Amino acid sequence: MPQQWRLVSARVATGTEHMATDYWLLEQLIAGHLPPTLRFYQWSPPALSLGYHQKAWPHHWQTLTWQGRPVDLVRRPTGGRAVLHQGDLTYAIAMPLTVARQAAYQQICDALIAAWQQLGVSLRYGTAGSGYRHQANCFALATAADLVTDRGYKLIGSAQLRRDRYLLQHGAIRLWPNAEFHSQVFNDHAASIAERPTEIPASPDADFLVKLQTSIQQALARSLGITFVELPLSAAEIADIEENSTAFANLAGPWPKTLTSGPGDTGLHP
């Protein structure tokens, strides 16, 4: 009988809430209180999420605004570089690690490739080398941990946290990036934004988001041999998550006491 995973309904929340939620889901899985979980979400206000091991970032990131609102600056429990969360859809998966970490990554990303193929978009793995670690911007280069279109547009960037035999994987799906805002944050011209797949609607589209999430959910079910049960976060769960949410906004720490950093806790980026 296929293993049942929890599907958490899509939510719009702040960066600190999202990072605390994903880490909480991993902790509850490890403790045996919750099954493996998939959730999708968007960020309000827009946010910059720093990779767990990212030690430096431009000073002006502390005072960024978008449409008159301050931009959140938070730290992810996963590795990699900074991600600008504006116009994107983020997925998070907390799951047991039953195969090698690289193999688990490929299982998830192969499902993402299959889901987008259903929508008419062909994706492949990136090929950037070790120069990635000198970049502040996750989407500046596409490594073997990322998925790009045939025209070189980096559509999905992903990173992981491994805790013992459990895994948290994040991925940002760049759907409607604003070129001017991107340039303001990263001081570049964001030329690759012009290569965004035409299969994605020109402006944010709720129906497309539902179709995309359903396609990814179905592809993961096929790839991993699982089924999903949709169950939103309860009021009690949200209250429990909020107790530790400030840890992810305090870039200098302290972090939740159970969070450990070791060689296996980085993102898959070189």
Image (cartoon, rainbow, N blue to C red):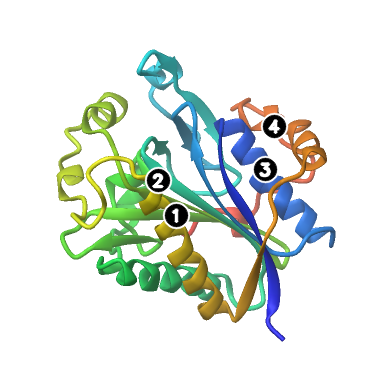
Residue at image x 28%, y 64%? 127
Across and down, in percent, residue 140 comes to 28, 45
**Image position, residue 249 (x, y; %):** 61, 27
Q: Note whether 87 is above or below 145 in the view shown.
A: above
Residue at which label 2 appears: 206
Q: Residue at x 71, y 68 (%)?
A: 165
Residue for badge 4: 245
Classify mark 4: residues with Cα within 10 Å, few (<14), some (14-19) or many (20+): many
Q: Which mark is residue 21?
A: 3
Whole-angstrom CA distance, mark 4 to mark 2, is: 28 Å
Q: Residue furthest front?
A: 207
The nearer-to-camera label among 3 and 1 is 1
The quadrant of the image that shows the C terminus is bottom left
Q: Is residue 23 visible?
A: yes
Amino acid type shown at disc 2:
Ala
* Structural distance between the alpha carbons of marks 2 and 3: 23 Å
Mark 4 or 2 closer to N-term?
A: 2
Q: Is residue 176 left or right of residue 106?
A: left
- Residue 71: % across, % down: 45, 22
